């Protein structure tokens, strides 16, 4: 299964796109894993929107999902300002995050919920790949 869409850099689009993506993946992962995907995608797309808007020239955000017998692979490509290569390294442990803060939780949540995180910043865009291993229920 492959699912692709483009979204405008708007928080309302995150609220629209995440449920669509979860519906597409409903047969590929267990309910617990789908919840992890939902949280990680909401955080990652919110970050992509923020970076796209901060760039001053917001462009569409490309979202894709692929599933095969072993994993679900999600990809987000934004045209925001280039982020540092080590953005997802040395993120805070979940227990060290203040749940009352309005920001600063996303990178840690994404890193801990996904089985693998690949981040590729390049001139004029950022690519984030999240991999969730399929479980025996799917």
Image (cartoon, helix red, strand yellow):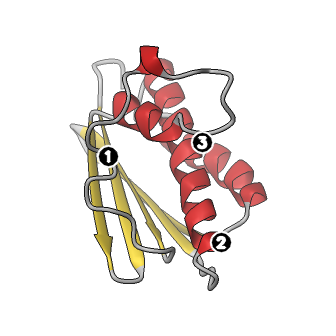
SS assignment at label 2 = helix
Q: Which residue is mark 1?
A: 88
Q: CA distance from mark 3 to mark 2?
A: 27 Å
In the rendered view, tell whether residue 58 sits above or below residue 129. below
List x then y, in percent, for residue 108.
Answer: 42, 33
Residue 39 image offset from top left, x and y in percent: 55, 34
Q: Residues within 10 Å of mark 1 (few under 14, many from 20)?
A: some
| Residue ID for mark 3 | 23
CA neighbours of label 2 inside 10 A, class few (<14), some (14 to 19), many (20+): some
- Mark 3 and mark 2 lie on one chain; the one further toward the N terminus is 3
Quick check: 77 above or below 93? below
Q: Residue at x 53, y 26 (%)?
A: 35
Give the mark nearer the N terminus: 2 vs 1. Answer: 2
Residue 6 at x, y percent in the picture: 58, 72
Give residue 93's quadrant in the image: top left
Determine whether 131 is above or below 5 in the image: above
Q: Residue at x 62, y 63 (%)?
A: 49
**Mark 3 touching mark 2, by CB under 8 A?**
no
Q: Measure the C-alpha gap from mark 3 to mark 1.
A: 27 Å
Q: Along the horizontal axis of the image, is 59 left or right of 73?
A: right
| Image height of 60 relative to 21, above or below | below
Q: Please give the residue where the numbered disc 2 appears in the rendered image.
A: 53
**CA distance separating discs 2 and 1:** 21 Å
Looking at the picture, how far across and down is residue 81, in whole percent?
A: 47, 74
Q: Which quadrant of the figure contains the C terminus? A: top left
Q: Nearer the viewer, mark 3 or mark 1?
A: 1
Label 1 sits on a secondary structure element that is loop
């Amino acid at each position: 299964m492959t699912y692709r869409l483009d979204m405008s850099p708007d928080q309302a689009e995150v609220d629209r796109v995440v449920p669509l993506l979860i519906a597409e993946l409903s047969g590929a992962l267990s309910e617990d894993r789908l919840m992890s995907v939902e949280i990680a995608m909401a955080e990652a797309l919110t970050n992509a929107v923020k970076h796209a808007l901060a760039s001053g020239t917001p462009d569409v955000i490309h979202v894709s999902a692929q599933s095969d017998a072993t994993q679900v692979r999600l990809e987000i490509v934004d045209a925001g300002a280039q982020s540092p290569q080590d953005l997802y390294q040395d993120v805070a442990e979940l227990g060290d995050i203040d749940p009352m803060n309005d920001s600063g939780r996303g990178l840690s949540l994404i890193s801990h919920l996904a089985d693998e995180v690949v981040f590729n910043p390049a001139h004029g865009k950022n690519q984030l790949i999240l991999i969730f291993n399929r479980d025996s229920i799917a």
